[in-house]
Amino acid sequence: MNFRTLVAALAAASVIVMAGCGTRESSGKKLIAIITPSNDNPFFKAEAETAAAEARKLGYETSVNSHDDDAHKQDQLVDAAIAHGAVAIILDNAGADSSVTAVSKAKAAGIPSFLIDREINAKGVAAAQIVSNNYQGATIGAQEFVRLMGEKGDYVELVGRESDTNAGIRTRGFHDVLDKYDGLRLASRQSANWSQAEAYQKVETIIQGNRNIKGVIAGNDTMALGASAALKNAGLEKVIVVGFDGSPDAIASILSGGIKATVLQPAATIARLAVEQAHKFLTAGSTGMPEKQAIDCELVTPVNAGQFGLFGRK
């Protein structure tokens, strides 16, 4: 294969990757590539849709794709964004360590990356890293859990994917509060990998050996909802369940008397900020903000649940 043929083949491959993994609006405008985990999760869907809407409002063309938490697929999507001449990338990345190379590659190609939701383990590579203050959110969630538990009783902790930075930050925030109370006993700590089905199975197994569980604190809402369903199926509806994310399904559960509380991450606000800062960077040469930015979370309970919509206040 000669050089010209090879270039043509690579270009064709990049089109296939872009077309096969998501959507792109073609209008001849400057392109902002938006890459997130699977949009089957309402949190990531809200990120992608909000970022795309804000980019369109500012006059950009958009491509929206999912890496499905697969670092290799993420690399392909970043390569495709570079090949398509994207002027910026909005990225909820596939791993704190495994994503550094992809973000560095985009920077070397002159394309700034604006990370949302998850940080990477490198500074000076991304133009911005805008995340929920997961530690702050975990502490306010844990404080509400302590209050609901009456400061005593056996509880279960469900943690997210072990490789996810946010999973570690949230569990640290939980325990910096929970471990202060001698009356609380951690009966089981299990990873349910952010999955509702896996959380259901894990809790179903745990309660077979211990029906005295008084509470479940979960690192995200999908796991909280899975736990709640397993408890309800076992006739243990009174067990306290607290989640994290502020998803519409979790808020609906709170309003209907299911899970007792969640911690809302302002996903839509963060996605909007990332696009606004990308636009400022592209037009003024700087975001005017520090690279790392943490946005505080909010506690959602039956008292205020009606005030919240799609990962933010109505």
Image: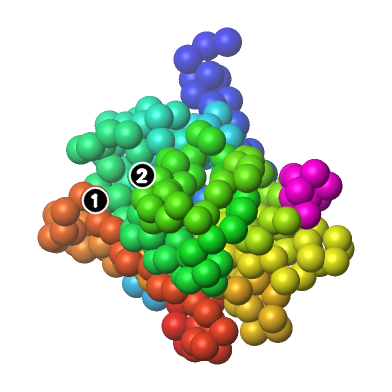
Direction from residue 90 to residue 234 in the image, left or right: right
Position of 69 relative to 129 (above/below)? above
Direction from residue 9 to residue 173 in the image, left or right: left
Q: Position of residue 8 (x, y in %)?
A: 54, 27
Badge number at residue 292:
1
Which residue: 47% across, 15% down?
Answer: 3
The N terminus sits in image quarter? top right
Q: Position of residue 73 (x, y in %)?
A: 57, 34
Residue ID for mark 2: 119
- Is residue 150 within the magenta segment? no
Q: Position of residue 197 (x, y in %)?
A: 77, 51
Front-most of 282 and 216? 216
Residue type, mark 1 in image = Lys
Which residue: 42% across, 49% down?
Answer: 179
Residue type, mark 2 in image = Glu
Label pair 2/1, CB-CB below 8 angstroms:
yes
For mark 1, give the secondary structure: strand
**Residue 155 in sight from this viewpoint:** yes
- In the rendered structure, which disc, 2 or 1, sits on the residue that comes first in sequence? 2
Determine the CA span between mark 2 and mark 1: 8 Å
Position of 242 relative to 210 (above/below)? below
Task: Report the magenta residues as a range.
Answer: 202-211
For mark 2, give the secondary structure: loop
| Crowd rating for badge 2 (residues with CA inside 10 Å; few <14, some 14–19, many 20+) | many
- Is residue 209 within the magenta segment? yes
For residue 221, what is the image quadrant? Answer: bottom right
What is the residue that sits farthest to the top in this orientation? 1
Name the image colouring. rainbow
